[in-house]
Image (tube, helix red, strand yellow):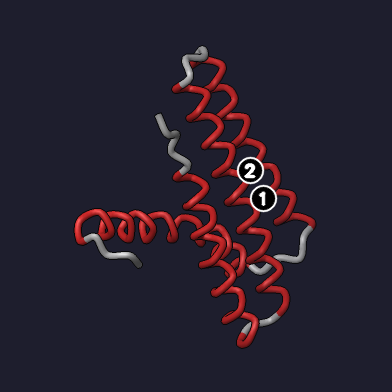
Amino acid sequence: MKKSKIYQKILIFSLIFFIILYTVCNMFLGKLFLYNMVVGFIISVGNFLGLVFHVKKSFSGSFMGIGIGNSFFRLMLVGVFLYMWFKFGMLNIWGLLVGLSVLTIAMPIYVLIEYRRKIDGTST
């Protein structure tokens, strides 16, 4: 039985989307915006990989209570990192928000493309 590695495909698709967005923003916006966009994307990818690990562990039959604690720890870690970034980092909130939402926007787009491939047989 072949294991699904859809999370890797989503990460690759979001990385391609991020590189295109970074290139376009590099032409029109400042370095502070780009720096915060990169940091936001790294936070988003780290959170996504933590979620993937948590879901895999939950479906493998491990104890769920420990998994819930790890999930709260992961979210708390992201919250502490964002707080420290707001307090001590050079902040451009728009760049950070764009970086955080790249993966969130890329997921439904990837799902729609895969759905279209299965329905139409189209290779996109």
Residue 35 is left or right of residue 73, and the answer is: right
Could you tell me residue 37's position as x and y percent? Answer: 63, 66
The secondary element bearing badge 1 is classed as helix
Q: Quadrant of the N terminus?
A: top left
The secondary element bearing badge 2 is classed as helix
Gap between marks 1 and 2 measured at Cα: 5 Å
Q: In the image, what residue occupies the spot 37% across and 61% down? A: 109
Could you tell me residue 65's position as x and y percent? Answer: 51, 15
Residue 63 is left or right of residue 33, and the answer is: left
Residue 66 is left or right of residue 1, and the answer is: right
Q: In the image, what residue occupies the spot 58% across and 37% down? A: 50
- Where 17 sits versus 28, above or below? above
Q: In the image, what residue occupies the spot 48% across and 19% down? A: 60
Tag shown at residue 79: 2
Could you tell me residue 95's position as x and y percent? Answer: 61, 69
- Where 26 sits versus 95, above or below? below
Q: In the image, what residue occupies the spot 59% across and 70% down? A: 19
Tag shown at residue 82: 1
Callout 2, which amino acid?
A: Gly
Callout 1, which amino acid?
A: Leu
Tag shown at residue 44: none
The residue lying toward the viewer, choosing from 108 and 99, is 108
CB atoms of marks 1 and 2 within 8 Å = yes
